[in-house]
Image (cartoon, rainbow, N blue to C red):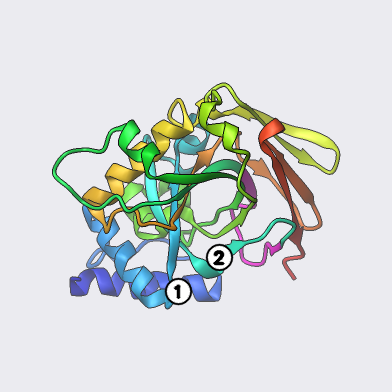
Amino acid sequence: MSETAETAAALLWQHWQARTRVASLPSACRPASRAQGYAVQAALAALAGQPVAGWKIAATSSAGQQHIGVDGPLAGRLFADRMLAPGATVSLAGNQMRVIEAEFAFRMAHDLPARQAAYTQADVMAAVESLHPTIEVPDSRFEHFAGAGEAQLIADCACACWLVVGPPMPSRWRSADLAAHPVRVLLGQVEVALGRGANVLGDPRIALTWIANEVARHGPGLKAGDLVTTGTCVAPVTVSEGDRMRADFGELGSLEMSLASAS
């Protein structure tokens, strides 16, 4: 790990811990490419002192790309202490994004290590153990995240923050048309967003294949036990303190969470 990546990671980690923001990483340690961004992200994970429990994909949908100002997907590590059970209450303290996202997430049964040939969708799906409903509460350590650029956003774990994870979906998901599958978000009993699986690179399975190859190219590869969330199926939903949210995946399941006061 280069000294430059470690310097950038140390600065970002300070802001993670303090729930504060930085305008931009200093030019002397600012990543200028995807590869450099992933090097900083790896150094950040080393500083976090938490197991990497999985990965997220940011910006798999046009709405998600617009939200953070990029034109393609980004991969980010998920730390074990940031994964929560259904019904969890998440504090909005220090959170500037203040949105939630409803996402399909795959649990891996087998490793997909780095290799010369790209993984096919069939390769990747054969390595999956289960599928889960999730609600992501993302955030960024940059003051103006929509202008930070992909390399800095990758360095910051692709806007990772909290992920609420539901139980495994019924095994019939394997034969389901996930691209056409509807996903709703409700505030209390009121529907506030409607989307479908096709909003994540055309299909959650395609999104998982993308990140399997991205992580094999720029990192350690996906590992057995990793939970990989594939991006929001709905436009990011603005939330406030006290909101109780539900992500409804129809016959495949649902989960709820609440947002706590930022005080």
Viewer-proximal residue among 160 and 148: 160
Measured along the vertical axis of the image, is residue 182 above or below residue 130? above
In percent of the image, x 54 and y 23: which residue is there?
177
Which residue sits furthest left?
Answer: 116
Q: Secondary structure at mark 1?
A: loop
97 in the magenta segment? yes
Estimate the spatial distance between the alpha carbons at disc 2 and disc 1, rounded to whole Å: 9 Å
Residue density around tag 1, few if under 14, some if 14–19, many if 20 or more, within 10 Å: few
Q: Is residue 202 above or below residue 225?
A: above
Q: Which residues are magenta?
A: 89-101
Is label 2 in contact with label 1 (beta carbons under 8 Å)?
A: yes
- Identify residue for label 1: 50
- In the image, 187 versus 209, the foreground residue is 209
> Tag on residue 239?
none
Q: Badge 2: few (under 14), some or many (20 or more) residues near its Cα, within 10 Å?
A: some
* Residue underneath mark 2: 82
Across and down, in percent, residue 116 comes to: 13, 44
Is 217 left or right of 149, judged from the image as shown? left
Q: Amino acid at mark 1?
A: Gln
Amino acid, disc 2:
Arg
Magenta-span inclusion, residue 70? no
- Across and down, in percent, residue 82 comes to 55, 65
Callout 2 secondary element:
helix
Observer-nearest of 251 and 69: 251
